[in-house]
Amino acid sequence: MKKKTTIYDIAKRLNITAATVSRALNGNSKISEATRKLVRETAKEMNYEQNKLAQALKSGKSYNVGVIVPRIDSNFFASVIRGIEEELYPQGYHVIICQTHDQKDLETENINSLLNAQVDGILMSISNAQNGNDDSFNALIKKNVPLIFFDRKKDIKGISSVTIDDFKGAYDATKHLIDQGYKRIAHLSNDRSILIFKNRYLGYKQAILDSGLDFDESLVIETHSKVLEGRKTMKKLLEIKQRPDAVFSSSDFTALGAIQEIKEHGLRIPEDISVVGFSNEPFTRFMELSITSVDQSPIEMGRLTAQVFLEEVNNDKRIKSEKQVVLTPELIVRKSSLKTQIPDKA
């Protein structure tokens, strides 16, 4: 039977100490990235397999990280998870993915299940039912389990987050519509008790006020981020006496529903009504009528979220430092909002 490779074999091959090999394999920040990479590559070449149980007992870490999202069937959250995995896997971590379906009870259950699984940290985007889950968040804080919010967050002292500037994204989207000559711009919002949707509403409102247009609250309708809800909401807007000539949606899915309803009424996009979404889902650029949308850099958001977690978990002194990382959004202009058409920007 072939003898299993040990850290001593790797150390002998590289002419370094076994302790250095062990620290490198465990992602110790005191070991240079170049050495960690060399050790990992050599370990792989020599078919070395770490004893995960022994590693966990020795280090006090499970090397498992929980990621909680409202849903995984959207490109945005799937891409954030990809970014998280790309940062954590090379450091020896495994990711456990949970989804809440925007249900508070399920969110609580996910948090408790991950705690029972002894995860080293939880990275999460909160559900729409954000109010009332303080007990679960406090339990994480008391157990000294790192909690990092991304995209949707709750302001809790000492908790880090990685988000985009939703206010700026909405402001730029609305200003683009105004610059195209649209004056009566509706906003398909979402639950504004969620900070990101509140900020998108505020960005939309400020752009209208800064441009000297009349702000009409009746053109703002809260709905859910679903295609069917977008259709229902747009139908209501088309029935009012002074219908909007443009729509800024806080979601690409709602924007898609709005577009379907506009076409159903025999109206042209963007000549009669212009539409802008938010998130830059893949379908927005592949449709015949490509949709203008705000890109949120989800892969980068995932990577940065993982990096913030690693900084916390690798802090030997366990000094709590709150980080608020805010990414800059980018408006991707396409056919759905341009009166004078130009080639699409992917």
Image: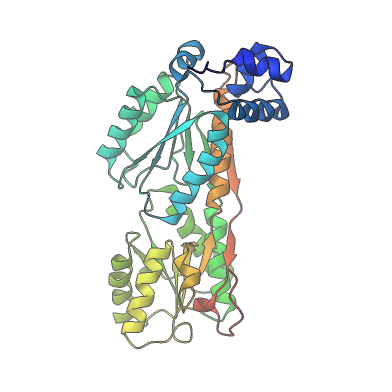
Comparing 335 with 249, the one in front is 335
Comparing 238 with 60, the one in front is 60
Residue 88, by quadrant, is top right
Comparing 97 with 330, the one in front is 97
In the image, farthest residue toward the right = 15
Residue 107 place in picture, x, y as percent? 31, 38
Comparing 343 with 218, the one in front is 343
Q: Is residue 11 above or below residue 211?
A: above
Q: Residue at x 35, y 49 (%)?
A: 71
Residue 109, by quadrant, is top left
Colouring? rainbow
Residue 3 place in picture, x, y as percent? 53, 15
Q: In this view, does 283 lie above or below 235?
A: above
In the image, farthest residue toward the front = 1
Residue 311 place in picture, x, y as percent? 60, 28
Q: Residue at x 29, y 75 (%)?
A: 236
Q: Residue at x 60, y 49 (%)?
A: 327
Residue 4 place in picture, x, y as percent? 52, 17
Q: In this view, does 298 lie above or below 338?
A: above
Q: Can residue 162 be seen in this view?
A: no
Q: Which residue is drawn at 46% across and 79% down?
A: 288
Q: Is residue 101 above or below residue 60?
A: below
Quarter of the image for the C terminus: give it. bottom right
